[in-house]
Image (cartoon, rainbow, N blue to C red):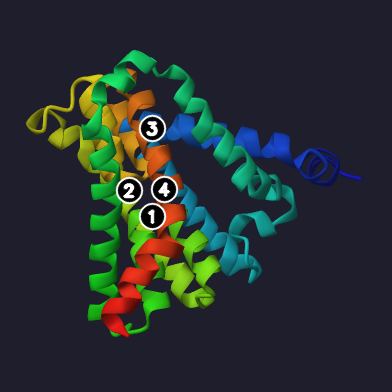
Amino acid sequence: MDILEFLQKDVLIKYNLVTAFAIIGFMIWASYLVSKHLTRGRIHGSAIAIFAGLVLAYFGGKLTGGTKGIADIPAFAGIGLMGGAMLRDLAIVATAFGVRMEEFRETGIGGIISLFAGIFVSFFIGACVAYAFGYRDAVSLTTIGAGAATYIVGPVTGGALGASSDVMALSVAAGLVKSILVMICTPFIARYIGLDNPRSALIFGGLMGTTSGVAGGLAATDPKLVPYGAMTATFYTGLGCLLGPSVIFLLIRLVVE
């Protein structure tokens, strides 16, 4: 057995989760170098890392003909676990531990309004775009509208309503585009909207909702604001999963059917 075969079978494949952490760690390190030296920090390193991950997923799928992107390659199977729901939800919940509850309580009614406004506006815009592209049934309109809220709410709503896999894929795509746009644009608009304190970060997270986009954008603006924006963005995701297949679906069905 030569050294390459040994590394592949007894190291990369056998310890695929460790391999995944090493690969993702290298990608993040490289992405932050690119952000620092090529964009002078204007495009956050996490946005570059997400884009690189999407590119790898695409080429992994093309290479293997599978359904899990690069995770279909045995040596990289650990990326499928690392990027799965378990570690994702752990990371989202962990961001809340940096919040001072005094700041959260001071947000008051504004934070609650931002949550509901962000969810209903996102659903409305997504449903209007879906309608413009020819979707007329309430299930598809609601699912794509949910994707415009976040790429987590989209498939959760679609699964509850029995949407087709194509429609759920569109909802995920819409959520990813929103997440990347929020991540990239936040540092540019922060000073114009007063995004420089915990209260405004809480409201911003409630309006935007996409936890990864809000966290990445705030990290490029002021890392101290990340837990606050992520807190309400996480609430947004849960509230969207609750309202999407129930109240919002019934409202959309009343309009289109």
CA distance for labels 4 and 3: 14 Å
Where does the N terminus fall, quadrant-wise? top right
Give percent across and percent down for residue 131. Answer: 26, 79
Residue drawn at x 43%, y 38% is 234
Which residue in the protein does label 1 denote? Answer: 176
Mark 2 vs 1: CB contact within 8 A: yes
Residue 230, numbered circle: 3
Residue drawn at x 33%, y 22% is 104
Look at label 3 and name its amino acid: Ala
Of tags 1 and 3, the one toward the viewer is 3
In the rendered structure, which disc, 4 or 3, sits on the residue that comes first in sequence?
Answer: 3
Residue 105, numbered circle: none
Mark 4 vs 1: CB contact within 8 A: no
Name the foreground residue: 92 vs 41.
92
Which residue in the protein does label 2 denote? Answer: 180
- Judging from the image, what secondary structure is the residue with disc 2 in? helix
